[in-house]
Image (spheres, rainbow, N blue to C red):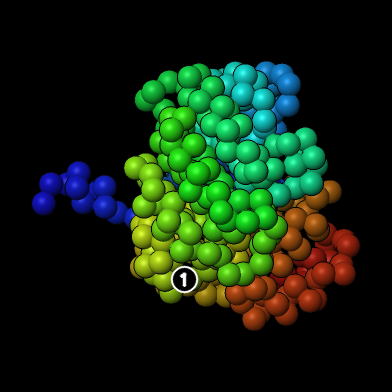
Amino acid sequence: MPLIELKERSVRVILAPMEGVADAFMRNLLTDIGGYDLCVSEFIRIVDQLLPRKVFRRMCPELYNGSRTEAGVPIRVQLLGQDPQWMAENAYRAVAMGSHGLDLNFGCPARTVNKNLGGASLLRDPESIYQIVKEVRGAVPDDQVLSAKIRLGWDCKSQCVEIAQAIRDAGAKELTVHARTKEEGYKPPAHWQYIKLIKDSIDIPVIANGEIWSKADYIKCKEVSGCDDVMIGRGAVAIPNLARVLKGGDKMQWCEVKQLLIKYSEIETTGSKEKYYPQRIKQWLRYIAMQYTEGQELFIRVRSIKSTNDILKALAE
Ligand SMILES: Cc1cc2nc3c(=O)[nH]c(=O)nc-3n(C[C@H](O)[C@H](O)[C@H](O)COP(=O)(O)O)c2cc1C
C-alpha cells in the first residue's frame, strides 16, 4: 500500500487550547511525552487593533522555535474576536510569524468575551461567522490551513450544521467540534452524534472534541462521530500520556505522574514564576485527581496549603 495512503489514514491527536492550563510550558511537557500531532495555542483576543508581535510571542513562545514545541510538535495560533477586518490582519501576522496555519475560536463560553459578541455568542449568528472566516481566509495564504473550533450552538443544537456549512463555505479547511452547546458548559455527556451530522454535511476534515478520557472513550467517540481525528483537553492534563494511550500505549503509572509533577515544580518555582506556582500546581492536581486515586489524596493534602515550600514537601512525601 502506498505510504501516503497509510499516513493519511493514521489518527491525529491534537492538544486542545486551554487558557491558563495548556500554556507553553505545559505544551512542552505533554508533547515531550509524545503522541501529539498538533497543538493549538490558548486564544489570543482580538478587539480593534493589530496586536504587536510581542503579544503573539508571549502567548505562543514556540514562534521563536519555528512554531514548534521543544519536542518538535507544530503549534497553530488561535484567535478569538468578532471584527472580520481585525481578525484578518492579526491572522496574517500570526501566520507571517510562523504559525502552522490559523485557528478561529467560536466556542468560548467566557462571559466577558460573549458580552462583546465574541466566542460562543457568534454561534447564534452563522452569517457573522461566515464573514469572519471569509475575511480571514482572504488574508491567510492558501498553503496555510485555516481551521475553526465550534460548539454545537449557544443554547440549542438546531443550527450546528448551518454553522459548520458557513465555515466550510467561507473557506476553512478543518473544523473541530466540541460536542456541546455553550449552555451545556462542561456537563457530561458530549453529544458526539451531532459531530457525525456535521461530518456528513461538509467535505472538510472534522475533528471530534469533548469528554475523551480513555482509549474506550476514543473508540466510542470514533464509532459515534465517524471521526478518526480527535482533540483532547482536560483528559490530556489529567492523564499526561493520554495521546499515547489513544494510539495504543498504557496509561501512565502514578509514580511517573509524580515524577512529572516534581519536574514541573522544579521549573515553575524558579524566579518570578514562583508567585503563581501554588495556584498552578493545584489547578493541575485537580485534573489529575479525576483520574488517579493517589492524585486525589495529594490534592486533598495540598489544596489549603499556601506556601510553595510546604507544597514541595507534600510532593516529596
Ligand atoms: C480551562 C479551559 C480553558 C479553555 N480554553 C480554551 C481556549 O483558549 N480556546 C478554545 O477554543 N477552547 C478552550 N477550551 C475548551 C477546550 O479546548 C475543549 O474544547 C474542552 O475542554 C472540551 O474538551 P475536553 O472534554 O477534552 O476537555 C478551554 C477549556 C478549559 C477547561
Q: Amino acid at mark 1?
A: Asp
In front of the other: 74 or 314: 74
Q: Is residue 256 above or below residue 143?
A: below
Residue 16: image location, x then y, percent: 55, 50
Q: The residue tagged with tag 1: helix, strand or loop? A: helix
Instruction: Sort mark 1 into few (<14), some (14-19) or many (20+) by Cα contacts within 10 Å.
Output: some
Q: Is residue 35 above or below residue 79?
A: below
Q: Which corner quadrant of the image does residue 74 belong to? A: top left
Residue at image position (83%, 62%) is: 309
Residue 185 visible? The answer is yes
Residue at the spot of label 1? 217
Residue 141: image location, x then y, percent: 43, 20
Would residue 191 appear left or right of 80 to someone viewing this image?
left
Q: Is residue 183 above or below residue 224?
A: above
Q: Which corner quadrant of the image does residue 244 belong to? A: bottom left
Residue at image position (50%, 19%) is: 139
Residue 133: image location, x then y, percent: 53, 30
In front of the other: 261 or 133: 133
Would residue 243 appear left or right of 42 to someone viewing this image?
left
In front of the other: 102 or 41: 102
Would residue 81 appear left or right of 230 to someone viewing this image?
right
Residue 68 visible? The answer is no
> Residue farthest to the left?
1
Q: How many marks?
A: 1
> Residue farthest to the front?
158
Residue 258: image location, x then y, percent: 62, 69
Residue at image position (46%, 64%) is: 193
Which quarter of the image is occupied by the C terminus? Answer: bottom right
Would you say the beta carbon of the disc 1 residue lies within 8 angstroms of ligand 1?
no
